[in-house]
Every structure is written in C-alpha cells, then in structure tokens.
Image: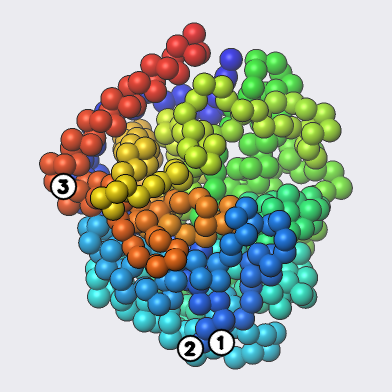
Amino acid sequence: MRKNLLHAVPSLATQLQRTDFNSDFLWGTATSAYQIEGAAATDGRVPSIWDSFCEQAGTIRDGSSGAVASDHYHHWAEDLDIAQSLGSNAYRFSISWPRIFSGPDSKPNPEGLAFYSRLVDGMLERGLQPWATLYHWDLPQYLQDQGGWASRDTVHAFVEFADVITEHLGDRVKHWITHNEPWCTAMLGHADGIHAPGIKDFKTAIQVCHHVLLSHGLATPVIRANVADARIGLALNLHPISAASDKPEDFAAARLHDGLRNRWYLDPLYGRGYPQDVWQALGDYAPVVYEGDLQAMAVSTDFLGVNFYFPEIIEHAPGASPLNTRLVDAVGVERTAFGWEIAPEGMTSLLKRIQDDYQPHAMYITENGATYDDHVDNDGQIRDELRRDYLIRHLLAVKEAIRLGCQVKGYFLWSLLDNFEWAEGCSRRFGIVYVDFITQKRTPKLSAHWYRDFLLETEKAKDATTTAKAATAATQQSQESSAA
Ligand code: IFM
C-alpha cells in the first residue's frame, strides 16, 4: 500500500477553461539555450561542459548533441511567431553563458549579448513577457577546467555573469530565474554522472549543490541593483514523496529522501538552514559552509519556480544509496514514454505542501510536460492526444491547487519545441511543436493546437477537455481498484 507523507487533496475538479484562472495568470512555454539554440561555434560562443560531455562515447543515448539541435539561433523569429500564435503571453528561455564569456578574463562578447537583445526585443514585439533563466546547465568548459561548481570561484564567476546580463537586458527583462533545477546540476552531473560534467562522487555533488544555492543568494542582490523592478526566483524540480509500505523504516526513509530531494533546497532558501535530519544522515558527506553562506542563500525572492514531472516512492534499503534509500516503481500506473509516472494529483498535493510549509510570495509552474513517441502521420499531422490529455489533467491539478489556496500565478509548458533532451539526445520529444532535426521544419502538434484553442478560448478546446475528463475519471477508477 502507498502512503503519502504530504497533504491529501480532494479529487480533481473536472472542467477547464482559461477563465477559471485569473485574468493576470501568465501562460507560457519554456525552453533552454543548449537544448534548442545549436550554433555551437557561432559568433564567438565557446564550448560548454555539455559540448565536451557529448563528445565522450556512450554519454548520449542516440549519440547526438546540442551542436545543431533545433537551430533556434537561426530560427528564433519563427519560433517566437509560433509562441505568439498560441495566444501565450510569456516565454521562458535561458542564456548561454559560453556565448557571453569566452575565458577567465574575457570581456563580454558583444555578439552574444546582441543575440539575446534581439531575442528579447522579439518577445516584447510579440506580446511575450520575457522570463530569463541565467543557468540552465551549460557551464563554460573553461570554468569546469578550473574546478567547475565544485569550486567556490565558480560562485563568483556566476555573480559576474548575472551582473553583466542583467545590466544589459534589465531595461527590458524584469523576470529572472537564477538557476534551473539545482538538484540536476548537483546530483545528475556530479553524483550519478549521467549529465555533464559526468562526475560520480556524492560528496562533490553535495558541495556543488551548496555552491549553486550560494550563487543564487549572492547574485540576487546584484540583479536587484541592476534592475530596480526585478522579480527574482529560482526553479526547483520538486517531487511528492511517499513511503513504499507502512513499515516505520520505509516512512523514515521516505522522510529522509524528501529531505534530500525537496527540503535540502527549500529550507535554506526560506531561511531555515539545511534540514538537520539530512545533515546528520549525511555525516562526512555534509558540505563545507562558510560563515554567512546560509544568510546569503536565504535572500528574499519574489517567487518560487516549481518544475513538476512525477512523484517518487521510497523504501529503506541499507547500502543502496548514501542515505540507505531506494526508489520503488509504482505498479499499475500510467507513464509517459520516459517511464515517468503520470500523477497530476501529486502536483496538487506538492503545491499545497509548499504553500503550507513555506508560504512563497508567489509560485509559477516553470516547467511541466511530457515526452511521447510522436510520429508524423501521412497527412503531415502529429496527433499527440496523450500529451494533450497530460497537459489538461495537470492544468486541472493547478486549478485545484489554486482553489485550495495556493498562490500559483502562471504556467510554463515544457516545452515549446522538440529539442536536445540531455543524456537522451534528440530521441525524446517534449515539444508541442515537432521539429524535423534534418530540415528544421516546425510543425505544431495536436497539443499545440489544443493549447492555442484553450488560450484563445475556442469550442474545440472544450471538446478536448471532455475527452481528458473521461481519461481522468478512468485513471482515478483504475487507481482506486489497484489500491483496493
Ligand atoms: O528537458 C528538461 C529540462 O531541461 C529540465 N527539466 C526537465 C526537462 C525534461 O527532462
């Protein structure tokens, strides 16, 4: 049996229309630089850790890289046209650090700055509010050569990068996300080694995590100094966690895993320091923390970005991981093509938990979406009903969270375009717009048509909502019968 440690929520509401959300609710799509831009050696860009990682044999499932990806560097105007045509009013993108700085003592690269200037102007011309992420995983390789995020020097390099970018774009960009998913930077990149820079050392990963959070804390006042009316936050990938059984040791393991996955980030950001239960369990793995670091990390922010994909189930497993925890696969659940469990009700409970425990000024869903094995039909259409239904069910979950009092103010769908999905290469498609990676032709999928119809409030979207309502009911029924 599965027990949720967090908040139980009433069943999801079953209707969805744009007018269910406040008129100032933000509707967007999200992307990141390395995943879409391509143009890896254009206009003075230098290699990032991902360029180097992709060159190593066996790191990327299909052997691809972000060298060309969706070639957004050359197709940005067309891509922004598509974002505008959806009826969205915001667009989340990231800035490629190696386009801006080419070496330890280099001056900012004017061509790199000019690209983002054009991009931001393009958003504003199309009525898209720009949301810029400063770090979405593409550290310049020259910084990795000097120790990367394991070195405190990178914290200061990041603050300088944030300073230059916000000074340059701050007259037009008011919404700033310092980091995307610090857990991935730290754990996937430095403990599991399945992301760049491919290091497998848990102690290093914990130290990296500290430096990333510290860099957020130190960069935030610098951004505020440059952009008086800035709205600043960071985007965390958070998960509802449950225990695999009623056994006390599984509950304790789930609580500890929640500590390392969620509270390790939220607690220091909201002024509580690192959670003591996790700190003690880490023992010698605990990070080196200087005096003043925790105060810096607890800097006041304007919003929390929540990236939601899937819940996790945990059991006690001595020796399986540094904290003696192990992930358990849920049985009889729906999954995306990535194998990620589809659990919109988990999104509601997660948001409610964050609201109750941390009271952020505002929350934005900065990522939510799904990968499926899309194919182009003979008539050229991509009929990704599963992705459309996934989106509807998650928007219903957001609507329910708001009804329960959560201060959710916007939703950025991941992702606008098919792109380079990190270690999975170009073989995993998260976009609502299909990209032919050979011709670079863009084709909006059925999910994009649905999102547009929903945002522009047409009848077609309501028909699709009815379909998704039936899918939700069927899922709930199957979950109830497998729980019984
Ligand atoms: O593609 C990634 C994104 O870069 C970060 N969040 C999760 C997405 C899907 O894996």
**Front in this rendered view, residue 246 or 290:** 246
Question: Can residue 272 be seen by looking at this rendering?
Answer: no
Residue 45 appears left or right of 125: right
Query: For the residue carrying disc 2, how many other residues have a C-alpha within 10 Å: few (<14), some (14-19), or many (20+)?
Result: some
User: Closer to the camera, 275 or 381?
Assistant: 381
Q: Which of marks 1 and 3 is nearer the N terminus?
A: 1
User: Which disc number belongs to residue 111?
Assistant: 2
- For the point 53% across and 37% down, the residue is 340
Q: Nearer the viewer, mark 1 or mark 3?
A: 1
Instruction: Look at the numbered disc 3 and give the secondary structure of its residue.
Output: loop
The amino acid type found where label 2 is placed reads Glu
Relative to residue 40, is residue 472 depicted above or below?
above
Q: At 49% from the left edge and 14% from the top edge, which residue is drawn?
A: 482
Q: Which amino acid does label 1 sit on?
A: Gly
Q: Earlier in the sequence, mark 2 or mark 1?
A: 1
Dot 2 falls on a residue whose secondary structure is: helix
Mark 1 CB within 8 Å of ligand 1: no
Observer-nearest of 12 and 54? 54
The residue carrying mark 3 is 457
Q: In which quarter of the image is residue 243?
A: top right
At x 48%, y 88%, the residue is 111
Report the amino acid beneath label 3: Glu
Q: Name the residue under label 1.
A: 44
Mark 2 or mark 3, earlier in chain:
2
